[in-house]
Structures are given as structure tokens and as C-alpha cells.
Amino acid sequence: MATSSRARRSAGLIRQPGRTLVVVLMAVLACLPSAPARAGSTAVNATTSGPRLFVLGDSIAGGSDQGGNGRHGWPALVAARLGLTLTLDGEGGTGYTTAGTRPGRRAYPQRVDAAVATAPDVVIVEGSRNDVDPTRTRAAAVDTLRRLHARLPHARILVIGPVYSDPQPVGSRPVDDAVAAAADELPLPYVSAVRRAWFTGSAHRFIGSDGVHPTDAGHAYLADRITPELSRLLG
């Protein structure tokens, strides 16, 4: 009996460090940062437990080979500054009327269900310079924004127009006017990157070598402009 008891105690002593090691490993893993999002992917930043932010957009939101991927993108920067939990759905080449050329990507109206499924407290819809037909864009934008508004009645929604990279002021662009009209119809707050000339003049230095996409510095610049807009919306 004594030998059996000692054996059981010995076995317990052998197993205990194993349990301790598991606990330690779990604690270490929990402290590791989440992997950055790939460009054009949907990713969740679960580093905060604040209100939920869903961003729907194109590569200006999702990042590109010029910059703005993962924590360097304006969606992650805005979320961090305002203490929000981010879900990012940024697919390059897409827009209200187009799914782009890469297989598996979808236009904005086909991604409303994914946005609703996250039960966000606030939604940003950005873009898109990939849309080319103003009439079709307005109709698709009304459809997208109306369904988001109807299915997320308590969420705040901010609409940001297509982000172009004009070196000189252009005043207006037809697709930007179309998305603005769609937002106004609901009505929802709208920010025109064209009319505010976000990347015009000296700010054009924040555009990468492809002449289209912002660099990491450009995404930080965008975050500086979008954060106050979202902060006012959140009240």
C-alpha cells in the first residue's frame, strides 16, 4: 500500500510540470500579436474588445504591394486610435459594380451578408475607383448602402468615396458624384476624397510608384483624415 501510494504521488509529481508547461505555453501564445492581414484579404484584428468596426472596400482599404497591409493600413490605424475591433474586407479590383478580374472576388453588393454577420457597431464603405459607369454605380451603391442600413439599424455607417491620386485638383469625378448621391438618398454621411483633394499637390508624395496606391505613409495620412470623421460619427 505504501509503495502504491508513493507511486501515485510520484506520478502526480511527474504530471504536474506538464500541466504547468501547458499553462505557460498558452499564456505565451495569448500574448503573441496576431498575424498581419494579407493585401486584399478579409481579416479580424482581435487585439481590442471595443466596439466592432467593419470596413468594406477595395485595395485602397485592403492594402497593396505599395503599402498599407495589416497594421500599416488605415483601417487598422483608425481602429487602434479609437479602440475599435476591426474586421477588414478589402478586395483589390472590386467596387460597387465590379468583382475585378481575380477569381473568387465579389462586388460590394455580394459582400453585404459578410458585413452583417459580424454585427458591427460601425461600418465604413470605401470606394471605388474601380467603378466606371456612374449610372450603374449609383444604383449599386443605393442597393448596397440601403441593405446595410436596413439590416444594421443600430450601426453607424460612414461612406467614403473613391480615392483617386490626381496630382492636380480636378474638382469632381462622375463616379464620386454618383456615390455621393447614393449616400445622400438614404441619407448617410459622405466624405469625398476628390473634393477634399486628399492626394493632390504635396500630398501626392504619399502615392506609391504605381501612381495609384498609397504607401505606408499614405495610409497613415489617410488615417489622420478618416479618424476625426469616424470619431464625430461615434459622438
Image (tube, grey):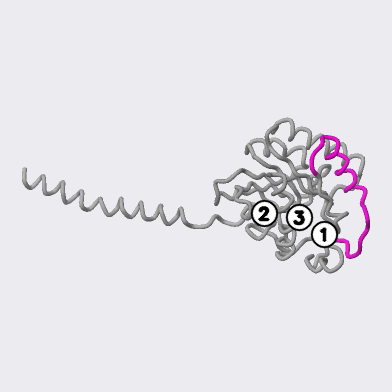
**1 and 233: which one is in front?**
233
- Residue at mark 2: 78
The residue carrying pointer 2 sits among few (fewer than 14), some (14 to 19) or many (20 or more) residues within 10 Å by Cα, namely many
| Marks 2 and 1, how far apart at CA | 17 Å
Q: Quadrant of the N terminus?
A: top left
Residue at the farthest left position = 2
User: Residue 88 in the image: x percent, y percent?
Assistant: 66, 48
**What's the magenta region?**
165-189
Residue at image x 91%, y 61%?
169
Q: Amino acid at mark 3?
A: Ile
- Residue at mark 3: 60
| Marks 1 and 3, how far apart at CA | 13 Å
**134 and 14: which one is in front?**
134
| Of the image marks 1 and 3, the number of the one nearer the N terminus | 3
Q: Quadrant of the C terminus?
A: top right
**5 and 164: which one is in front?**
164
